[in-house]
Amino acid sequence: MRAPVDTIAAPLFPTKLPWVNTNGAQASILQRGKPMLVEFWDFCRPNSLRTLPYVKAWHERYADAGLRVVGVHCPGFEPGRDERAVRDAVTRLGIVHPVLIDSEFEVWREYGNRGWPARYLFDGRARLFDYHYGEGAYEETELAIQKLLGVAREPLAPLRAEDAPGASLVAQTQDQPGAWSGTYEAGGVWAVLDGAGTVTVKTTTDGGGKASGDMTLTVEHPGAYKLVEHKRHTEGVLDLRVDPGVECLATCFTPGVAS
């Protein structure tokens, strides 16, 4: 979404917060004349992980043209407060752009941020040019990046049907606390897990009680784990069982395209 005015300046990053993939020096991040994309995310939130491939690709595609991408990690769940867990997640997820660890939401408050994921695109004067809350609008963001950089190329192809511009989405079941089982409507189901052990997932989607999905998932690190993925918005029944060594912090649902 294009910023309504061009006078909103990018707040400076607090100097004492830890960084990953950089020493965090302001001069190395806020380079004059170069646009900057700031992405608020959390490795325990499915929506952040679904957006992450686009953010990584924009860094790869446009860093040489002058774009700086900065991830700001703010924890939505307790495991995300641990600095080591964040550093491990950055490595595991293959993130190479700078990531600021904002465990106490200092940067979040400076931005007046509203949720995960959220992205803010600033121009070469560090003035807000474009922003977006939540998933989606990937093509719009990439075209805004290209406008600031003065480059033109084919935007990234949508990774999922629901990411395509103009896709008709259906509201999914609301996220539920803990290891939840029951009827749902969504394009996908995720669980926020911690500990070590296994999780058993069964899904029924045909109304006749026939199990259409049955899997056992091994949990080795905290984070958001994908349990079920449908091609489009689907009605189903979820049966989720976790080992004693595993803690399920939330059961989450992602959108799907209309049938």
Image: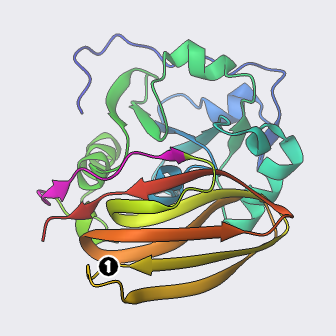
Question: Can you say which quadrant of the picture contains the N terminus?
Answer: top left
Residue 122 horizontal side relative to residue 80, left or right: left
Q: Secondary structure at mark 1?
A: loop
Most frequent secondary structure within the magenta stretch: loop
Instruction: Give the colour scheme of this rendering.
Output: rainbow
Residue at point 70% right, 58% down? 193
Q: Residue lying farthest top?
A: 7
Relative image position of residue 118 (x, y in whole percent): 44, 36
Relative image position of residue 160 (x, y in whole percent): 31, 71
For residue 242, above or below residue 250? below
Q: Which residue is mark 1?
A: 205
Q: Residue lying farthest front?
A: 208
Residue at point 46% right, 69% down? 238
Can residue 67 be seen? no
Question: Can you say which quadrant of the picture contains the C terminus?
Answer: bottom left
Residue at point 26% right, 23% down? 3
